[in-house]
Amino acid sequence: MVGEDHDFVHKLVFLGDTEVGKTSLVHRYVYDSLSPEIGRTIGAMLHVKTVNMDGAKHKLIIWDLGGQESFVKLREQYCANASGAFFVFDRTRVETLQHIDDWLSAIYAAAGEVAVIAIENKIDLESIISDEQIQGMVEARSLKLIQTSATENKNVDTAFEELVKVIRGSK
Ligand code: GDP
Ligand code: MG
């Protein structure tokens, strides 16, 4: 297309409880920083990054969420037309993994059966959840699992690459 600076556009949304590290992962990926001074997101924030993958330019429009409370109101708009989603949980808080189905039903209801990748964040910290439990939860829902640390910049790029791969594969 004339004037287009990319071949594909993907809307990616971040799902998961408050404080699991969604904003930190987005900032690490888009700006290569943690921007801790930005504090807790209010409402929804959009971030754009264009990357080369498999010889094509992919424009990623990344949506990050504020507090869970606002999600009920935001949900439709936030999830609508998403190409894919990250479900992020914090390995130091088991409840953040147990809420997986709430987040998955929200995205599937609003956007259909789109690609979702599970992110086990904070791998620089000791886990309180067993690997078996995590594997069981994500495999039962046919999700791929990526282990990340936003703080130590581990696997953050990989998570985005994997999600784009799954999106491309499912089209
Ligand atoms: P959000 O509410 O899901 O957007 O979570 P934030 O990105 O605001 O992060 C919540 C807290 O977890 C902050 O204090 C972050 O510094 C911390 N955090 C985020 N990612 C990591 C990580 O990979 N490792 C550690 N140790 N802390 C993290
Ligand atoms: Mg946030």
Image (cartoon, rainbow, N blue to C red):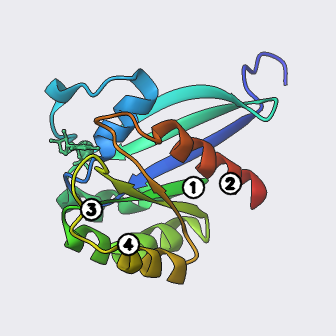
Q: Are marks 3 and 2 in contact (CB under 8 Å)?
A: no
Q: CA distance from mark 1 to mark 3?
A: 22 Å
Q: Position of residue 75 (x, y in %)?
A: 37, 61
Quadrant of the displayed image that contains ligand 1: top left
Q: Position of residue 72 (x, y in %)?
A: 27, 65
| Residue behind mark 1 | 84
Amino acid at circle 4? Asp
Give the number of the mark in front: 1 or 3: 3
Confirm whether residue 100 shows in the render: yes
Q: CA distance from mark 4 to mark 2?
A: 26 Å
Q: Quadrant of residue 30?
A: top left
Q: Are marks 4 and 3 in contact (CB under 8 Å)?
A: no
Task: Say above or below: 27 vs 99.
Answer: above
Q: Answer with mark 4 or mark 2, whichever residue precedes in sequence.
A: 4
Q: Are marks 2 and 1 in contact (CB under 8 Å)?
A: yes
Q: Is the CB of the residue bearing disc 1 within 8 angstroms of ligand 1? A: no
Residue 167 shows which numbered tag? 2
| Residue behind mark 4 | 131
- What residue is at 24 percent from the left and 62 percent from the top? 127
Residue 91 shows which numbered tag? 3
Q: Answer with mark 1 or mark 3, whichever residue precedes in sequence.
A: 1
Q: CA distance from mark 3 to mark 2?
A: 26 Å
Mark 3, secondary structure of its residue? loop
